Image (cartoon, coloured by chain):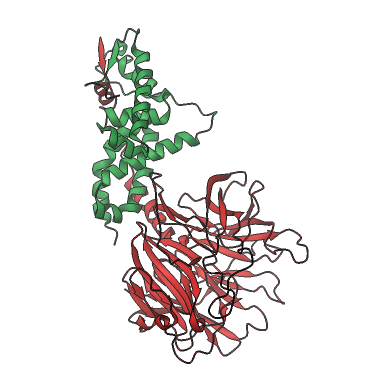
Chain colours: A red, B green
Amino acid sequence: MVNELRELLRDNVASAPQDPVDLSVVLATGRRRVRRRRLSAVGGAALASAAVIGLATLVWPAPPDLGAAGVPTPDAPTLHLADAADAVAGEDYRVLASHTNDDLEADNGQYLDGVTDDGQILFRDGPRADLPQARYALMDPATSEKTWLPDPPAPGGEQLWPVDLGAERLVLTGLRFAEASDGADPFAGARLFALVLDRESQTWSRLEWPDLPDVDRPGTQALGPDGRLYVRVPATQGRPPEGGWPTGPDGEADDADAPGDTYDLWSVSLTDTADVRDEGLTLGSMAFTDTSMVWTDSTNGDAGDVHVRDLATGDTRSFDPQTGEKCNLLSFGATHERIVMGQYCGTYADGVRDDRVQVLSTDGDQVVTVQDDRIDGGLAGTDGVVTVTSYQRGRAGTYVYDLRTDRFLRLSDDVSQWSMGGPTPEGRVLWTVPEHRRGATQVLGEILD
Amino acid sequence: MRDEAAFVEFAQAASARLRRTAYLMCGDWDLASDHVQEGLIRVYVAWPRLTRSGGEYAYARRAVVSALIDHARRRSSTEVVSEVTVERSSEQDVAEDVSARAALMTALTALPPRQRACVVLRYFEDLSVAQVAEALGCSEGTVKSQTSRALASLRSVFDGSPLGGLVTEGASSW
C-alpha cells in the first residue's frame, strides 16, 4: 500500500467543520490597531508638564540665508519656512478647544495633556503648591465639561507621561527615583512604573516590574501593536572626542555628528508584572507603525542605519537614511509608511544652524526635508501630521506638514517659551502660543483635508 | 481611505483556504480559526499598502503562518499538543479512517513548527522552495533541509507499519 502525501493532506481538510471566521471581530480589532498609530511618536514627545524650551528666541535682523552661511543642501526634496502657507481657520484647520494659563512663572497651572481615541481631552490640574498631587479629568472639547477621574496612585507626586489614551483605558508612565547623591544624574537609577485607568470601572492600577532594569529618561516608552510596553534600557553612551568638541564657525563647541547612544530593548506586560522580556535587540530610537517596528542604530548623535521589521512576517529591511554628514538624531517617529527624524546638523557662518525634519518612506525613499535655522520638530504626539516649531524672529511659530496631503502650513506666528502637549489622534494637533510674557495658551486644532 | 468592502470580499474568499492550511499546521480547527482571524487582522492593518503592491493572499498566508509559529514558540513547556481532531465521514469504515490520514496528522503535529510549515506549504499549498523560503523568512537551503528532515520523520511513521509507505509525487529536489 502506498500513501501519497499531497492526497493525504487534502483528504484531511476535505470536510472542514463549518466555523467561518468572524469578520466583524476582524474589522473591529483591525480598526483599533489602526487607531493606535498615533502612539508611534516616541521620545520626549509627550511632555506632561510645562517645560522651558531650550532654544531661546534670538534677535535676528533678517531671515538667515542658509546658502550664504554655507549650510549644505539635503539630497532630498527640501522645504524652508518661507515655503509655508499661512493656515486659514475654517479652511485649513478648525480650533476644537483651547486653555490659557495666565502665569506659569509663579507655579504650574492646568494643561491639555493629549486627546483620547474617542476625542476627549486629558486635562491635568497641577501639581502646584496648593495641590501637591496632580488631578486629571476628561474634558469634552465641544462643551468644555470636565469629568474628574479618581486620583491616580502616584502619591509621591511623580510626574506622569501619557503613553496610550484609548477609548477603553489610559496608560501613563512615570519614573520612581532612587535616592540620588549630590551631583548625580537625576535620571540615573530610575524605576519605570505605569498607571493604567480602566475607563469603564474608573479604577487605576499601578504596575512596576521587578525584573526590568533601570531606565534613564522618561517618555521614551512605546506601546506595541501587541499591547506590550516597549522600554529602552541604556546600553552605551556616546562620549565627546578626546580633547573635547571642535569649535564651530560661531566660536562655540560644535557637537554635530556626535557618537550616538544605544539602548537594549525590553518589553513588559501591562497586566502581569512578572512578564518582562529582554527582546535581544540593541537600538537607538524606535517607533511602531501599524504593521512594522522601526528603529535606528543609535540616537542623540549619528543615527546609523534605519531598520524596518514587518510585524506580521518578521522580515527586516535596513537602509541608510541619507541624513547629512553632521546630523544628530534628536527626535524619531513613524506612522503609516512614513518615518520622521528631527536632526541638528551643525552650525555655520554667523551662527546659522542647520536644523532638519526629515521625512522618509519606510522603504528609504526621501519624501521631504524641512530645513531651516532654529527649528525643531517631528511626529510630536500626533499622527499623520509633522509639527515644526520655529524660534526664528519673524518666522517663529508652529508649522505643520500634513503627510496626508503634503501641505506645509504655518499655524501660529509666535511660540511660547513653555512646551506642553501630548498624544493626539490622527489629524489633530496641540500647539502653544505665548500669553503676555508669563503665560501660555494651548490650542487643540483639527487639520482639515 | 481604507477600502473595507474590498477587504471583506478578500477575507471571505480567502478565509476557508487559510483555515485549511492553518489546521494542517496545528491539528485543531478552533485554533486554526483563531490564527486565521489574527492573520486577517494583520492583513486589514496592512491593506492600503497591499492593494497597491499586490500579493494580498501571499501576505495573508505569511501572517497566518507567522502567527502559528509565534504561538508554538510561546507555548509553555507544560502545555501538551492537543489530540488531533480528524473529521470522519459517516460513510467511511472506522478501521480505514484511523489509518493513513490520522497517522499523518499525528505525525505532523509531532514535528517542530517550521518543519511542519515546510511540509504544508510545499505539499498542500504547492509552493516552490523559493516561495516557502519567502513565506517563512528563511533561506532556500533551510527550507530544503527542514523539509528533508520532516519527510524523513513522516516516512518513519509509515515505513514498516500496516499503513504502507509514504511517497511524494515527483522527485525530491533535495
Please state if B94 lies on the left or on the right of A32 as rendered.
Answer: left
As displayed, is residue A138 above or below residue A372? above
Q: Quadrant of residue A446?
A: bottom left
Residue at figure coordinates x 57%, y 45% from the top left: A278
As displayed, is residue A433 above or below residue A197? below
Residue at figure coordinates x 42%, y 70% from the top left: A386
Name the residue at the bottom extreme. Answer: A61
Count of picture labels: 0
As displayed, is residue A300 above or below residue B118? below
Quarter of the figure with the C terminus of chain A? bottom left
Quarter of the figure with the N terminus of chain A? top left
Q: Work out whether residue B84 or residue A254 is closer to the camera in this orientation and state it.
A: A254
Where in the figure is residue A381, as x and y percent of width and height?
48, 67
Name the residue at the left extreme. Answer: B170
Q: Work out whether residue B88 or residue B39 is closer to the camera in this orientation and state it.
A: B39
Q: Work out whether residue A346 or residue B54 is closer to the camera in this orientation and state it.
A: A346
Where in the figure is residue A178, as x and y percent of width and height?
73, 58
Where in the figure is residue B46, as x and y percent of width and height?
33, 52
Q: Quadrant of residue A197?
A: bottom right
Specify whether residue A191 is in view: yes
Specify whether residue B28 is in view: no
Q: Work out whether residue A268 or residue A60 is closer to the camera in this orientation and state it.
A: A60
Please state if B8 lies on the left or on the right of A318 as rendered.
Answer: left
Where in the figure is residue B147, as x and y percent of width and height?
34, 26
Q: Quadrant of residue B125?
A: top left
